[in-house]
């Protein structure tokens, strides 16, 4: 989802019509059935099956006219429930490289006793859909699958081949990841000039006004590190200065106080340039100063007071887990912590580890990367061939709503595709709420109107990209 600060940074806003009962077009009715089937197929890691969800989407593609040869199902013997599919709608011009539509089928765990409604039943209530995956990421998976169905049913002949990849494992660090598996084992199957993915979108303010659209152009890489201190320990009645917990605490304080340097990509420079014009005042002036001189300490202090801006400007590392000691009456023999780093595009896991070591400056503190070790983030080009069509189609569907390029401070499966040379863009179109639609949390939801409007926008956008 697009970050909330993006909306706050822009002055322009367009009111949407009040929520009301909506009479669906026949194509919207068919889409709703597909969306409901996908949402109500449990794809949690614990008890669900992405393989099952992929089979259901594949059946819809076949019913629309896709041949068996155009649909590839994949899984591994070790992970039979974590499968996915790749579908291909062949283009008429072999000289034009394909485009890829990417979405993940898996969802975060959800317990019925914690939710107001059954998380695995699609409930439409007061203008919203409620369910786990109603947004992340089954809204996009449903839109992409539905688009392929409609294109095939209408006998649409794209110049550019359109590929669809529905994968599993994006939501769980240690799970089998279908996008990674495809990139490493079947790169020709998903080869494309570019891919369209989650990560962009649109932002509504708390009152339901359309504030901004965003195209995600780049993201950070995620890497975890373990800090650990080891000590012979002893009886707690005879404490010594070299206490493993104290040494770890000193290291954590050093991590807390360390700031990675300010950096810009083409995307973040464009984002901050437009943001400075929109917000004005002290913040706008500070952003302008920082763009001119990234080492400007005073400007950095002002801009970084906003948590989202702070994260967008640099690599960040933060302690997320802690353990240590073995008995109430014993000096600790071991203490450890997990440091979660979101690494700026172009920087590496190794250079980040070295920066942590320099900041901690204590040879008694070991710093090791923990699995999985992900690829470095490679920012895609801020390409007019991608941005211009998105802007043009947005003018038709969402007149007056500004659109910005942005870099995600989180991470998606796009990083695995970028590692094999496929630039990935998080598309705009589906507007999210100021509460981030409850994704990963309780009572995840999606505004009904936003989903249908976003579906129409993305369908038109696909056809523009596929036509040239």
Image (cartoon, rainbow, N blue to C red):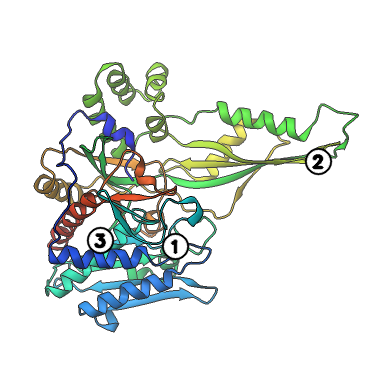
Which residue in the protein does label 3 denote? 143
Q: Position of residue 201 (x, y in %)?
A: 27, 47
- Look at 39% across and 65% down and name the residue there: 167
Q: Position of residue 219 (x, y in %)?
A: 38, 45
Task: Name above or below for residue 97 compared with residue 344.
Answer: below
Number of other residues with Cα within 10 Å of mark 2, as a class: few under 14, some 14 to 19, many 20 or more = some
Circle 3 — which element?
helix
Mark linked to residue 180: 1
Q: Does any portion of residue 111 appear in the rendered image?
A: no
Q: Nearer the viewer, mark 1 or mark 3?
A: 3
- Look at 39% across and 46% down and name the residue there: 438
Mark positioned earlier in the residue sequence (2 or 1): 1
Number of other residues with Cα within 10 Å of mark 1, as a class: few under 14, some 14 to 19, many 20 or more = many
Mark linked to residue 6: none
Q: Nearer the viewer, mark 3 or mark 2?
A: 3
Mark positioned earlier in the residue sequence (3 or 2): 3
Which residue in the protein does label 2 denote? 333
Report the Cα–Cα distance between label 2 and label 1: 38 Å
Which quadrant is the C terminus positioned in? bottom left
In the image, taking residue 240 as reference, residue 60 lies left or right, namely left
């Amino acid at each position: 989802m697009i970050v909330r600060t993006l909306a706050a940074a822009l002055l322009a806003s367009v009111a949407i019509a009040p929520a009301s009962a909506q009479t669906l077009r026949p194509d919207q009715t068919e889409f709703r059935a597909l969306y409901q089937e996908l949402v109500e197929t449990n794809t949690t890691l614990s008890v669900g099956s992405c393989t099952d969800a992929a089979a259901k989407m594949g059946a819809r593609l076949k019913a629309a006219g896709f041949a068996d040869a155009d649909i590839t199902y994949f899984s591994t013997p070790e992970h039979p429930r974590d499968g996915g599919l790749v579908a291909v709608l062949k283009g008429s011009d072999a000289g034009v490289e394909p485009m890829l539509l990417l979405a993940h089928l898996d969802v975060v765990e959800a317990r019925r006793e914690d939710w107001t409604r059954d998380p695995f039943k699609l409930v439409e209530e007061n203008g919203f859909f409620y369910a786990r995956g109603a947004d992340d990421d089954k809204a996009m998976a449903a839109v992409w699958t539905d688009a392929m169905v409609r294109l095939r049913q209408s006998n649409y002949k794209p110049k550019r081949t359109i590929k669809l990849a529905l994968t599993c494992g994006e939501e769980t660090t240690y799970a089998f990841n279908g996008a990674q598996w495809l990139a490493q084992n079947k790169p020709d199957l998903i080869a494309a000039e570019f891919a369209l993915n989650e990560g962009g979108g649109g932002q509504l303010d708390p009152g339901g006004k359309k504030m901004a659209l965003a195209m995600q152009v780049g993201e950070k890489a995620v890497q975890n590190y373990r800090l650990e201190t080891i000590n012979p320990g002893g009886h707690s009645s005879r404490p010594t200065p070299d206490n493993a917990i104290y040494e770890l605490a000193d290291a954590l304080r050093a991590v807390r106080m360390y700031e990675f340097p300010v950096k810009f990509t083409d995307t973040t420079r464009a984002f901050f340039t437009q943001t400075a014009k929109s917000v004005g005042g002290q913040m706008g002036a500070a952003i302008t100063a920082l763009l001119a001189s990234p080492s400007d300490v005073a400007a950095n202090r002002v801009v970084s007071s906003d948590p989202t801006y702070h994260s967008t400007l640099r690599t960040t590392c933060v302690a997320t887990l802690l353990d240590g000691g073995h008995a109430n009456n014993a000096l600790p023999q071991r203490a450890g912590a997990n440091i979660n780093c979101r690494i700026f595009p172009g920087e590496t896991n190794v250079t980040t580890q070295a920066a942590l070591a320099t900041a901690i400056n204590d040879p008694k503190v070991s710093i090791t990367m923990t699995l999985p070790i992900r690829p470095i983030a490679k920012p895609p080009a801020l390409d007019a061939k991608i941005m211009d069509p998105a802007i043009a189609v947005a003018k038709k569907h969402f007149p007056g709503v500004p659109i910005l390029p942005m870099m995600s401070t989180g991470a998606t499966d796009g990083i695995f595709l970028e590692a094999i040379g496929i630039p990935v863009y998080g598309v705009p179109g589906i507007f999210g709420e100021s509460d981030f639609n409850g994704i990963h949390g309780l009572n995840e939801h999606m505004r009904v109107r936003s989903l249908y409007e976003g579906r129409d926008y993305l369908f038109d956008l696909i056809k523009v990209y596929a036509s040239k």
